[in-house]
Amino acid sequence: MNRLNLIFIVDDDPIHQQITQIMIDRQGISNSMQAFSDAQEVLDYLAGHQGDGSALPDVILLDLNMPVMDGWEFLDAYSTLSNTLCRKIQIYVLTSSIDENDRERVGSYSFVKGYLTKPLSRDTILQLGM
């Protein structure tokens, strides 16, 4: 298993952020994690570091249902921004939604690597490091 350098957790719920961080930490797949409550902050960060591959996350775990900018708006904005980044970032939607329409809609974004439901399981986390 490859150890990831940096994982971004984008979720407005601090409890889910903490649970996700603890679960990932226990599996030892990442050197570092950073949690964001605001998806726009992540976009601003990515835009500010688009040419610095070492500052970009390997994985973004993205919640769909957030105030201000939701996951859908993030995915739409990222689809344009991703072409300017010096390397690819794996994006996984991490949501409590079990709505099949959400799963299908996420599938329309070619850069989204997977659709995961909360809470993360050990097996799912280990797949992130592959």
Image (cartoon, helix red, strand yellow):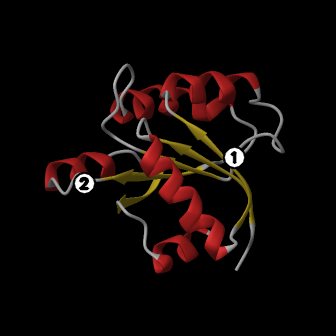
Q: Position of residue 13 (x, y in %)?
A: 41, 40
* Residue 130 in sight: no
Residue 109 as seen in the image, left or right of residue 10: left
Quadrant location, the C terminus = bottom right
Q: Label 1 neighbourhood size at 10 Å, few (<14), some (14-19), many (20+)?
A: many
Q: Position of residue 48 (x, y in %)?
A: 74, 22
First reached walking from the N terminus: tag 2 or tag 1: 1
In this view, 2 is above or below 72? below
The residue labelled by disc 2 is 103
Please, what is the three-letter code of the amino acid marked with disc 1? Pro
Mark 1, secondary structure of its residue: loop
Q: Residue at x 68, y 70 (%)?
A: 29
Q: Residue at x 15, y 56 (%)?
A: 100
* Residue 77 in sight: yes
Q: Nearer the viewer, residue 67 or 2?
A: 67
Residue 84 as seen in the image, left or right of residue 55: left
Q: CA distance from mark 2 to mark 1?
A: 23 Å
Q: Quadrant of residue 35?
A: top right
Quadrant location, the N terminus = bottom right
Q: Residue at x 76, y 38 (%)?
A: 86
Residue 88 as seen in the image, left or right of residue 75: right
Q: Position of residue 117 (x, y in %)?
A: 33, 61
Residue 78 as seen in the image, left or right of residue 52: left
Please, what is the three-letter code of the amino acid marked with disc 2? Arg
The residue labelled by disc 1 is 57
Q: Quadrant of residue 26?
A: bottom right
Mark 2, secondary structure of its residue: helix
Q: Farthest left residue?
A: 100
